[in-house]
Amino acid sequence: MGDPMALPLSKAPNPLLALEPPLPLHSIEAAHVRPAIDELLRRARAAIDAIVEHGPRTYAGTLAALDDAVEPLTRAMTVVEHLESVATSEALRRAYDDVLPEVTELQSSIPLHAGLYAALREAAASEAGLSATQRRHLRKTLADFRRHGAELPTEDKQRLAALDVELSRVTNRYAQNVLDGTNAFELVIEDEAELAGLPASAREAALASARAKGKPGFRFTLAAPSYTAAMSHLDHAGHREQLWRAFNTRACSEPYDNRPLVARILELRREKARLLGFRDFADLVLEDRMAKTGATARAFIDDLRERSQAAFVAENEALFAFRREVEGPEAQPLRPWDVAYWAEKQRRARFDFDEEALRPYFALPRVLDGLFELVRRLYGVRTELAEELPAWHPSVRAYRMYDEDGALLGAFYVDVYPRETKRDGAWMNGLVTAVPGPSGPGDPQGWSPHVALVCGNLTEPVGDAPALLTHREVETLFHEFGHLMHHMLSRVEVRSLGGTNVAWDFVELPSQIMENWCWERECLDLFARHHETGEPIPEVLFEPLRRARTYRAANMMMRQLGFATVDLELHVELDPAAEPDVMARAREVLERHAAAPLPDDYGMIAGFGHLFAHPVGYAAAYYSYKWAEVLDADAFTRFRREGFFSREAGRSFREEILARGDSRDPMELYVGFMGREPSVGPLLERSGLG
């Protein structure tokens, strides 16, 4: 993206002021940010003042007008935040950091605006003529205003606004430190003999990475494909230890030290919750989610831990016993950097399963084609490459999605390779949410188009071969595509209730249910073909894959429960003022859920963006992943019963879940699809823990 801050802007219109599909994502520069956001802030404030001073006290004149007032600003900031996360530069980072406090201040001021709150309450006095979705929108907004300080005295409102601004600033700095700390590390190995055990695909990728940097030998980084391959296969324990320690102490030292930021974020969240009348931050954020309270979330997590504990201990004893079988009775106890390595060896021995042997069958272009075919069969949608849509990097691909009647649903982008200018992890982001024409859902003009994206950090292509993925990477892609379908198939008349704008302990259902198809032969045969011969996965590889699905399932369960537990303990039980060593508290909690003792400098939470890279994010709500697993395992039983490509089940899931957003209570939506409330049994059965 370069550094255009020093360059004069052209006379062309500022693209951030005209963000209608197709979005001009290729032409947005850092120098556009400040003038555009200043103008959009001015327009939003003027529109809010007009609502208060002149707007009729109706739904259209208040709440609908408010949504329209802030949408251009929200859309522009979403696009800038996206570009800063996938194509960052010093100039773009400075521009984003510069405007973030003012945007946060405006967003925080809306529920604190006494005149606006009064106008909404007047509009709520009569719900005559409103649709059920509009009534829900009005009621939820009033509750949200109260939860965000609308009824606080003036002095407390001022303090709350200041807290929100500081939270946005500190969490943004946290996210930047994680990216910079990740990029600051590399391990270059010049002696090829020290790569023993590493698969050929990982060797080739490490060699290509070194050459790209003009370095001899083989280069390893903390990006997921490089790091995971080394930790699972590299025989050299010293190199594994170096990588593991680097990954788990990311952003734990200057100049990217997140440790004081974690403590400050917790302090700010605690003060915000108390100011708003809540016992703790968990009760604040969960009030409008399925769990409702931190205590309910904790009870759910504790129950799963109790069900998994015995199997967890047995799995770890069996892994150490396996190491002793291989190395003899003098084998050393497992250290954290040994666990993935020995688990991979044990899995191969027990199931005759080598995940690397599956790579040739998971060429990225075919995997995408398989995804597109799956959603065509389930939901009746058609996907086409849209090469003319510009993106932010040459490796990004754009697509359009059409409904079965030919109507355009929208466009989306796929960006799946690691870059130093891109944050780690995988995610979906909705840039534009469709709304109906002026006359409502039945308007003959139809719906405006959605725009969304899927990002990841998957294995890159080497040489002339396509990118060859692991099965776990295929799951990741399916997962994020599930989020994408939630966005692209949304048909909610109120923008702020559409797509993935649902309770965060419900939002993972559409994504996690997609992973189930990655384990079914009928679905794999759509796309899992050898990239050279075109042959499907042979039974000799497929059966071990299926058998290995529940391998160390209790450890996988406990890993997620550990993240959920540390999240809840830090946001419910910890008082940062009385217990300043947050890292030690987190380490103690996570060690109870770990397969091996953790070193004293273990600092995973300094790089835990889910909890600390956003003012709210998954904070006090990481349990949502496990709750959504309960939902997805249970919901998939209907597809298992009616057929993996059942159009009837697919139609029902689309209409009852994907299309509805937050237009109804999530439990009502789930019951609408399944005919009953969820059961934990299918999850335990799928995990081999039933």
Image: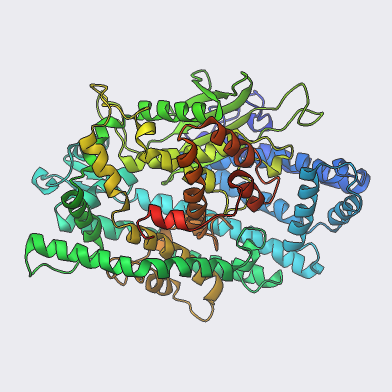
Quarter of the figure with residue 50: top right
Task: Report x, y in % for residue 153.
Answer: 81, 69
Q: Is residue 71 left or right of residue 62?
A: left
Q: Residue at x 48, y 66 (%)?
A: 301
Of residues 595 and 464, the one nearer the viewer is 595
Rendering colour mode: rainbow
Q: Residue at x 66, y 50 (%)?
A: 668
Quarter of the figure with residue 597: bottom left
Task: Report x, y in % for residue 168.
Answer: 60, 56
Quarter of the figure with residue 23: top right
Whether 211 is drawn above or below 572: the answer is: above
Q: Residue at x 55, y 40 (%)?
A: 429
Task: Report x, y in % for residue 627.
Answer: 51, 57
Kindly tell me whether residue 276 is visible in this rendering: yes
Kindly tell me whether residue 214 is visible in this rendering: no
Task: Report x, y in % for residue 585.
Answer: 42, 74
Of residues 208 and 98, the one nearer the viewer is 208
- Pick the quarter of the image with the C terminus: bottom left
Of residues 454 and 22, the one nearer the viewer is 454
Q: Is residue 368 left or right of residue 596?
A: right
